[in-house]
């Protein structure tokens, strides 16, 4: 690549930045995607149990039953309401309680005698997320209170006590995970949209014809769009991590930011090339939007950011090995959550760089063919 070619790529990239500056809608999209979108995703939908309505039917009225009742504390649960057995159905029918714990008569005596009495938990499963999480919380709280009560009475029967320790997120705060994953997903979305929209905007405004009569190659035009829009994404992600994730949401970033941005640069070559490739297939922005939904949204959903890769069918896991977004999510999580170094993530870096380079070359050929059709 000659000095003249590098100069052309730089000047065209600056032109792209000026064009983007005049596109108010795209600028608003970038600002929203790396600010309000991150904040609302982290705080708007919590995966934690918060202020769950719970009632207690205490038919034992013993010291143990009172301990269990007093163990349900905020912010996980509201203050437990003591109701009668007859009040269970009306209370749950009207949605007053998500959980109702029924403590049977002689519960404490049966526990002390080692008879393993049954304790009933009624759950309103229409509140699906709270129901699933709350069931585990309630079982853990009751088991812990019974074990503490038995130790106090000198009747410890368990030889082994399991103690769980949570790595990387000791309080299991969903916002720590959600905010970072929203940033990662938005990187893919914005990289594709910005580069694709840049090409379609020039085609619709007729400025692409002006470029074609200049002594420029299709590769120079494509590279200019890649570096200019990639730079916008890099700056937006850096500001988002600093101002929104770490400052506003108070989410600690464990690993090296420089290592993460190095991997992000590799990934942007693939994502921006994908945007240009889709733009060569589309004839207008509405068509580009439809292609984006068909390609980018499934890619985000299947890359491991929403559900673990291991939970997918084996044939789908094999396919996703060839998609750089899967490896991008993998090394981003490893660096930002677990403080992984280059000695751990270099295989993902190599796969993202290798597959991204191949697709970049393929997209360049498609872009060259598209330019040739316009010139013809």
Image: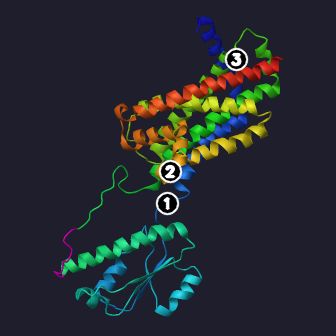
**83 relative to 276, above or below:** below
Residue appearing at x 60%, y 33% in the figure:
271
**250 relative to 164, above or below:** above
Q: Mark 2 near mark 3, Cβ–Cβ under 8 Å?
A: no
**Residue 263 placement (x, y as % from top left):** 47, 31
Q: Specify whether 126 is left or right of 335.
A: right
Neighbour class for label 2 at 10 Å: few (<14), some, many (≥20)?
Answer: many
In the rendered image, which residue does mark 1 sit on?
47
Q: Secondary structure at mark 3?
A: helix
Q: Quadrant of the C terminus?
A: top right
Among the 4 quarters of the image, the one containing residue 284: top right
In the rendered image, which residue does mark 3 sit on?
218
Q: Specify whether 118 is left or right of 110.
A: right
Residue 222 shows in this picture: yes
User: Which mark is on residue 178?
Assistant: 2
Q: Nearer the viewer, residue 351 or 106?
A: 351
Q: Nearer the viewer, residue 13 or 308?
A: 308
Q: Specify whether 326 is left or right of 141.
A: right
User: Which mark is on residue 85?
Assistant: none
Residue appearing at x 72%, y 31% in the figure:
279
Q: Specify whether 282 is left or right of 124.
A: right
């Amino acid at each position: 690549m000659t000095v003249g070619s590098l100069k052309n790529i730089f000047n065209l990239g600056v032109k792209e930045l000026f064009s983007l500056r005049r596109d108010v809608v795209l600028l608003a999209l970038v600002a929203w995607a790396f600010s309000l979108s991150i904040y609302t995703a982290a705080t708007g939908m919590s995966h934690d149990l918060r202020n769950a309505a719970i009632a207690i039917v205490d038919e034992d009225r013993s010291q143990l039953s009172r301990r269990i009742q007093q163990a349900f504390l905020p912010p996980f649960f509201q203050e437990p309401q003591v109701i009668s057995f007859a009040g269970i159905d009306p209370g749950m029918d009207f949605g007053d309680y998500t959980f109702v714990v029924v403590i049977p008569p002689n519960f404490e005596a049966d526990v002390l005698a080692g008879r393993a009495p049954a304790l009933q938990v009624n759950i309103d499963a229409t509140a699906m997320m709270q129901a699933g999480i709350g069931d585990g919380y309630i079982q853990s709280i009751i088991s812990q209170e019974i074990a503490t009560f038995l130790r106090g009475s000198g009747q410890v029967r368990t030889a082994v006590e399991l103690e769980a320790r949570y790595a990387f997120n000791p309080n299991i705060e969903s916002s720590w995970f959600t905010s970072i994953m929203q940033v990662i997903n938005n990187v893919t979305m914005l990289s594709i949209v910005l580069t694709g929209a840049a090409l379609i905007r020039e085609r619709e405004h007729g400025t692409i014809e002006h470029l074609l009569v200049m002594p420029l190659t299709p590769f120079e035009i494509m590279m200019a769009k890649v570096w200019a829009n990639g730079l916008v994404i890099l700056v937006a992600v850096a500001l988002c991590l600093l101002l929104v994730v770490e400052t506003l949401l108070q989410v600690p970033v464990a690993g090296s930011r420089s290592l993460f941005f190095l991997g992000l640069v590799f990934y942007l070559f693939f994502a921006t090339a994908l945007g240009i490739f889709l733009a060569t297939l589309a004839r207008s922005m509405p068509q580009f939007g439809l292609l984006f939904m068909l390609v980018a949204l499934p890619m985000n959903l299947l890359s491991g950011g929403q559900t673990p890769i291991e939970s997918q069918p084996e044939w789908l896991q094999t396919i996703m090995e060839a998609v750089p977004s899967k490896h991008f999510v993998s090394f981003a999580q490893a660096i930002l959550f677990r403080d992984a170094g280059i000695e751990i993530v270099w295989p993902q870096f190599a796969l993202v760089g290798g597959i991204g380079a191949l697709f970049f070359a393929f997209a360049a050929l498609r872009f060259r063919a598209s330019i040739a059709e316009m010139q013809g």
